[in-house]
Image (spheres, rainbow, N blue to C red):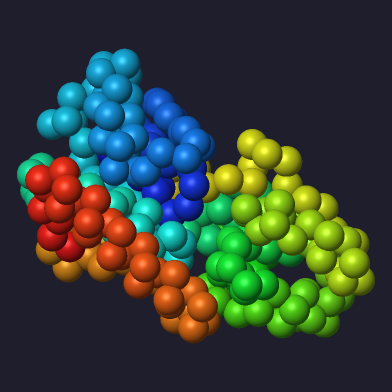
Amino acid sequence: MTILAIDSSALPVSCAILRDGRMTAEFTISIKLTHSETLMPLVDDMLKRSGISFDEIDAFGVSKGPGSFTGLRIGTATVKGLAMAADKPVIPVPTLEAMAYNIYGGDALIVPMMDARRKNVFTAIYEYLDNGLREIMPQSAIPLRDLLEKVNGLKRSVVFTGDGIYSFREDLEEAVKVPFLIAPPHLSMQRAGAVGALAEVYYNKGKYTDAGSFRPDYIKASQAERERQEAEEKGLLRELSAGGHSLYV
C-alpha cells in the first residue's frame, strides 16, 4: 500500500509518501509563497528523489480541513486532479486530528488549535486511548476564551499544538489553570506525514471516497473568518485567472 499525502491547510505546505506503514519521504516548507506556487513542484521533486513513480501510488491522503480557505482549495484541487488521473481513491483526514497525531501517546489531553483570527480558533480535543486517538470535543470554530474554559473544566494535563500556540501563548500562560505543555516546533505544524499515517488507518476502516465526491470541510467559522475566507477566494480566483489556469473543485 503506497499513499501520497498532502497538507496545505495553513502556512506550511507538505507532502509525504508512506509505503506499507513506513515513511518513505516527507517534504515540508513553511514560507510565505502561495501553495499554488509550491505544492506541485514539491510533489514532483519528492517523487523523483524517492524513486517512486506516479503509477505506484495506491491512494491519496489529504488534509480535509479546517484551515486556510485558499490552502484547502488548492490542496483539494491538486488531490482531486491527481486521484482522477490515477483513478485511485481519496482518503480525507481531519486537519486537527492529524495535528494531534503528532503528539502520540501519554496521558495528557491533546489540543490542536489554529488561529482563525480575532481571538477565534479552529480546535478540537483528543486523548490517547486504546492505541489511538479518541475525540473528546469535535473540530469546531470557537472563541479562544471558550476553548480555555473547556480545557480548565476538564481538569487534566494538556498539550497544546498548532500555530495558535504562537498567536496566543500569552493567553495560554495567563488563562490556563491546569498543567500544560506547548509542543516544540517540529511537532506543532501541519505535516503530510501525519496525514498519511492516519490515512492508512482510515483506509483500513473503509473511510475513503472517490475524487469526484471529495469536498473539504471548512467548518462554520465566525463572521470575521467567513469574510476573510470570501476575500481569499476572490484573491485566488484573480490569481488563477491572471495565470491562465482553471480550477474546478
Judged left or right of residue 233, residue 113 is right
**Residue lying at 43% horizontally and 77% vertically, measured from the top left:** 226
Image quadrant assignment for residue 136: bottom right
Viewer-nearest residue: 146 or 21: 146
Say left or right for 212 vs 75.
left
Residue shown at 15% from the left, 53% from the top: 241
Residue 42's quadrant in the figure?
top left
Name the residue located 29 percent from the left edge and 22 percent from the top edge. 45
Image spot of residue 88 (x, y percent)? 15, 48
Q: Is residue 25 above or below residue 198?
A: above
Residue 200 horizontal/vertical position (percent): 38, 48
Residue 95 left/right relative to 158: left
Q: Quadrant of the C terminus?
A: bottom left
Q: Is residue 186 visible?
A: yes
Number of numbered markers: 0
Task: Give residue 56's position: percent from left, percent from top.
Answer: 18, 31
Q: Is residue 131 visible?
A: no
Q: Is residue 101 above or below residue 68?
A: above
Above or below 84: residue 187: above
Q: Quadrant of the N terminus?
A: top left
- Residue 147 placement (x, y as % from top left): 71, 76
Q: Residue at x 73, y 41 (%)?
A: 184
Instruction: State the residue in front, 28 or 240.
Output: 240
